[in-house]
Amino acid sequence: MPFESPSSRAPVQLHTIPGNRAQPDVLTSEGLGAIPRPLTSLVGRDAEVAAAVRLLLDGTTRLLTLTGPGGVGKTRLALRITEEAAPAFADGSVFVALAAITDPDLALLAIARALGLREDTIRSPAELLTSNLRGSHLLLVLDNVEQVRPVATLLAALLAACPDLVVLVTSRVRLHVAGEQRFPVLPLALPAPTTSA
């Protein structure tokens, strides 16, 4: 099904975690790109959250990749980091879950849909993303990118074309693209055993 330009729809909420202003060309319907709300609190990761937020807000880190084995808590950590960092972004944040996607082209479409963009049949998904994100001060969160690693090349091009865009990625492996800052996520240490008297 072809996409249509978002300008043909009535304006709706831009992002789930709002920043300070709205970008009129990047519109999302409520729920698209929403930051999932975990049912439990994050325990034992305060230092990692603070360090990652500092990196995202330092003005030099444009692509931060949380790496680690499956089940270590990368997604949960990314959600907390996003919660802390998003208010500093004028256009807020958008979350894109890629766990069920293995085709890089479908990953681009998932990102576009999370942003509320519809293909206008003239531009490719990559061109659509670039034209609509240029000038946006946005935190884009991509979860499980290891399944669509070729999309990393697009991310590098997107970041080059959109100087105010910052991308937070979770992946089992690093992406190996220019500008990537790797942030290893290690398993939580077990508490020291207690002795009974």
Image (tube, rainbow, N blue to C red):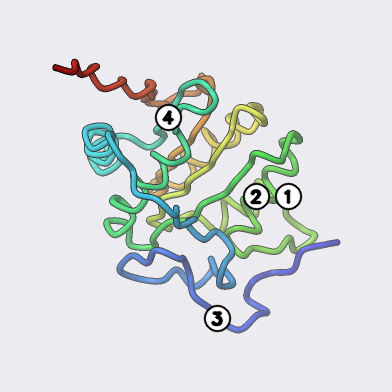
Q: Secondary structure at mark 2?
A: helix
Q: Residue at x 32, y 34 (%)?
A: 61
Badge 1 marks a residue whose secondary structure is loop
Task: Tell me the residue that label 1 is attached to.
Answer: 124
Q: Residues within 10 Å of mark 1 (few under 14, many from 20)?
A: some
46 lies above or below 137: above
Q: Residue at x 47, y 48 (%)?
A: 140
Please identify the quadrant where the C terminus is shown.
top left
Secondary structure beneath dot 4 equals strand
**Mark 2 touches mark 1? (CB < 8 Å):** yes
Residue designated by label 2: 127
Q: Earlier in the sequence, mark 2 or mark 4?
A: 4
- Residue 48, image x and y in percent? 27, 32
Q: Residue at x 33, y 62 (%)?
A: 90
Q: How much space separates mark 2 and mark 4, taking CA atoms?
A: 26 Å
Against 56, is 110 above or below?
Answer: below
**Residue 113 in the image, given as x and y percentages of width and height:** 66, 58
